[in-house]
Image (tube, rainbow, N blue to C red):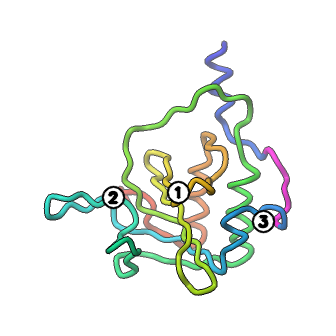
Amino acid sequence: AELKEERLAHNCIHRSNNSFGKRIRNYPFNKAAQIKIVSFPGAEFGNGDISIGIPKENDTICYSKLLESIPLNLPQIDSLTDIFYNVGFSGTVYRETGLACYDPRNAILFFDSNGKIFEYIEICFECQKTTESSNKISIGMPCEQKFDLIKKFFRKVGIKYVELKE
């Protein structure tokens, strides 16, 4: 009975009804002049090195290797922050589980007023994990369906490449 209750607690619900004005004050949304969602190829193997994540050269994101890049408008940012900050676990969660894979193909990039990326969230939809550029940011509570909601958002905005099988 406890295990069943624990599983149910992992389901997502709309826990809060924080307004867009309140949600947009969360870092890094409050500092971003522009936000883009992107896709990029999975892990690359070359010269004996493995490159996983956002394509970079000399610690700088390599835009030419991005497959798709879509800037978000205010209604889209409203939808994304609603998923991050208003959707969470339906009950008390005592343990979180996850898969061991990590081969991200998507990210959310936060740009400053000079057009430079100052934060990002890398996303692996297959194993439902993220890597953030700093510990100041997160996608909120990683409830069971949250990655499906974010994936649906990416597709609705126009990103086609969100999983390997695609």
**What secondary structure is found at the residue carrying circle 1?**
strand
Between the residue at mark 3 and the residue at mark 2, the CA separation in whole angstroms equals: 31 Å
Between the residue at mark 2 and the residue at mark 1, the CA separation in whole angstroms equals: 14 Å
Report whether 15 appears left or right of 155: right
The percent position of residue 37, horizontal first and vertical second, equals 54, 71
Name the residue carrying label 3.
25
Q: Are the residues at dot 2 and dot 1 in contact (C-beta closer than 8 Å)?
A: no
Q: Amino acid at mark 2?
A: Ile
- Magenta segment: does it hold 17? yes
Q: Amino acid at mark 1?
A: Glu
Q: Are the residues at dot 1 and dot 3 in contact (C-beta closer than 8 Å)?
A: no
The disc label shown at residue 52, or none: 2
Report whether 106 appears left or right of 45: right
User: Looking at the image, is mark 3 or mark 2 earlier in the sequence?
Assistant: 3
Q: Which label lies toward us, 2 or 1?
A: 1
**What secondary structure is found at the residue carrying circle 2?**
loop
Name the residue carrying label 1.
132
**What secondary structure is found at the residue carrying circle 3?**
loop
- Magenta segment: does it hold 5? no
Q: Which residue ends up furthest to the bottom in the rendered image?
A: 114
User: Looking at the image, is mark 2 or mark 1 earlier in the sequence?
Assistant: 2
